[in-house]
Image: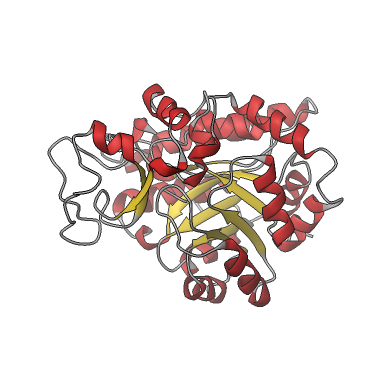
Amino acid sequence: MVTGSTSAAGASPVDTSSIDTSPVDASPIDTSLGAALKTLRLPLLQAPMFLVSSLRLASACCRAGVIGSFQIANSRSAADLAAWLDAMRREGEERRARGEVFAPYAVNVNARGLDQPGQRDKFAVVERARVPLIVSSIGDPAEVVRRAHGWGGRVIHDVTTLRFAEKAIAAGVDGLMLTCAGAGGHTGELSPFAFLPQVRRMFDGAIVLAGGIADADGLRGALALGADLVCMGTRFIATTESEAPDEYKAMLVSSSTADVMPTDAIAGLTANWLKPSLVANGLDPDHLPAPSGQHKPNLPDGVKAWKTVWSGGHSTGLIDEVLSVAQLVDGLGEQLAGDLRSGWQDRLARRLMLG
């Protein structure tokens, strides 16, 4: 599910001279995060998608009352990321001062790459901003957990197998995103009906369910299964605020689940792709070039995973139109009216050990 803003393409070298390296303010933010979670309109997290999720999309989601997010890789530099985080902070403060909703936001980090120059500098910015929620993916999240807990943040780790879930629990994460079969991007293979109950047996923290969910019925099903939050990715690509090209959004509307194809040929790791996008790039879905290794696809010049070849999950077949984030969330809210269990926000806060 975690997969990302066109603004990241051709990113300029990171300028570390402007990064604040003074000690991080360690005063806890647990109370404010817990209070903010209790104002959520729906138990919904917008997925942090490569080249799609941006400041504009995340901020629209937070205004609508659901958790917005973006990858730190989607900002061109550490300075740009600092500007994004400052904009989220200022908008949240201004809206809350007026008595308006602004849900918490999350950023996605690669747990395996914290020591890499570009990511190291960007995570320092995240640390300075004391981002309330971190969605980590790929690798051991132990160091992410240690540092995030230092500023009172909470960490949700993206997993696709029970073994990865066990490792993340041992690392001390506060929540798990279970990416199941049917997710867009780097998908999982497990059924949520088997995956989630087994994880719940060994984990009392927050569980986010991802994969093939795009409407109110999917939300109801995920919550009935025991999820605390639902993650939607593909549905948010087809919103006016996403950074996806208009042609990509139109392709999601015109495609069906039958047009979604899993393969490792495009990114060197299995992910779900839209067949019409493969064809538009001159590729034959039935005869794709085999990758030379993990993350090493053999694609023609100019054909790029995520940038020119587009992804979608099984929920593609549920998307009939491009909506604004407000329209999407309003519609889900109307359809779910009266169906959400009383006190779900409080339970979510408790799952994240926020009181």
**290 and 8: which is toward the camera:** 290
Q: State the residue at coordinates (16%, 35%).
A: 302
Does the image show residue 157? yes
Is 38 situated left or right of 105 in this image? right
Q: Position of residue 236 (x, y in %)?
A: 53, 35
- Count the numbered circles shown: 0
- Residue nearer the viewer, 294 or 197: 197
Q: Nearer the viewer, residue 139 or 130?
A: 139
Q: Residue at x 27, y 50 (%)?
A: 267
Residue 239: horizontal and vertical position, in percent?
53, 27
Inspect this view and state whether residue 28 appears.
no
Q: Is residue 159 above or below residue 216?
A: below
Q: Is residue 139 above or below residue 55?
A: below
Q: Is residue 142 left or right of residue 77?
A: right
Expressed as whole percent of the image width and height from the top left, the position of residue 143 reads: 47, 66
Residue 138 higher or lower than 3, as above or below: below
Q: Quadrant of residue 205?
A: bottom right
Task: Give residue 227's position: percent from left, percent from top.
Answer: 68, 58
Quadrant including the C terminus:
bottom right
- 339 lies left or right of 178: right
> Which residue is at a point 52% across and 23% down the rendered structure image?
240
Colour convention of the picture = secondary structure
- State which quadrant residue 208 falls in: bottom right
Residue visible at 40% across and 53% down? 186
